[in-house]
Amino acid sequence: MNRTELIDAIADKSGLTKTDSKKALDAFIDAVSTSLTKGDKVTLVGFGTFSVVERAARIGRNPQTGATMNVPEKKVVKFKPGSELGANVKK
């Protein structure tokens, strides 16, 4: 499902117009992004939790040349699915 299909699905299930659904999706993405930027977790009970974790620095390998290189530490977004989401996906 891409962004346009998601907006269409939100509009169909909520009764909102596509324009309002797009605004709602944009607001959700902005709110989650802002919280994660601050280092906060975003927990949606039954759906899952978005959080920021720090990956440690490591030594990697260039697959084309085989040369080793240092990969610096960085922060990445992690999603842990909730129990209800996991139960629905496995069906």
Image (spheres, rainbow, N blue to C red):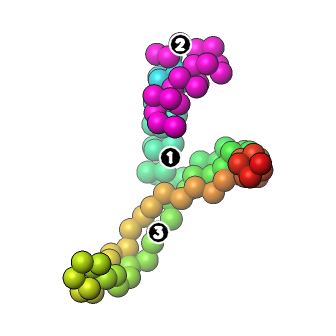
- Residues 41 and 57: in front is 57
Residue 54 - label: 3
Q: Residue 50, position in %: x, y?
A: 57, 52
Mark 1 or mark 3, which is nearer the start of the sequence?
1
**Local crowd at mark 3 within 10 Å, few (<14), some, or many (≥20)?**
few
**Image mark for residue 35:** 1
* SS at mark 1 in the image: helix
Task: Give how far apart the Cα atoms at labels 3 and 2 are.
Answer: 39 Å
Q: Is residue 15 magenta?
A: yes
Depth check: give the residue in front, 34 or 83. Answer: 83
Q: Pointer 3 and pointer 1: residues touching (CB < 8 Å)? A: no
Give me the residue at 66% from left, 49% from top. 48
Disc 2 residue type? Thr
Q: Is residue 31 visible?
A: no
Q: CA distance from mark 3 to mark 1?
A: 16 Å
Decide whether residue 11 is among the magenta residues: yes
Question: Cα distance, mark 2 to mark 1?
Answer: 27 Å
Taking the spot 58% from the left edge, 25% from the top edge, the residue there is: 9
Dot 2: within a 10 Å radius of its alpha carbon, few (fewer than 14), some, or many (20 or more) residues? some
Instruction: Give the answer, above or below, for where 86 lies relative to 16.
Output: below
Q: Nearer the viewer, mark 3 or mark 1?
A: 3
Q: Is residue 64 left or right of residue 7?
A: left
Disc 1 residue type? Ser
Mark 1 surroundings: few (<14), some (14-19) or many (≥20) residues within 10 A = some
Give the main secondary structure, helix, strand or loop, of the magenta stretch.
helix
Q: Say which residue label 2 marks.
A: 17
State the extent of the magenta-drawn residues as a range: 1-19
Q: Is residue 11 above or below residue 69?
A: above
Give the number of the mark in front: 2 or 1: 2
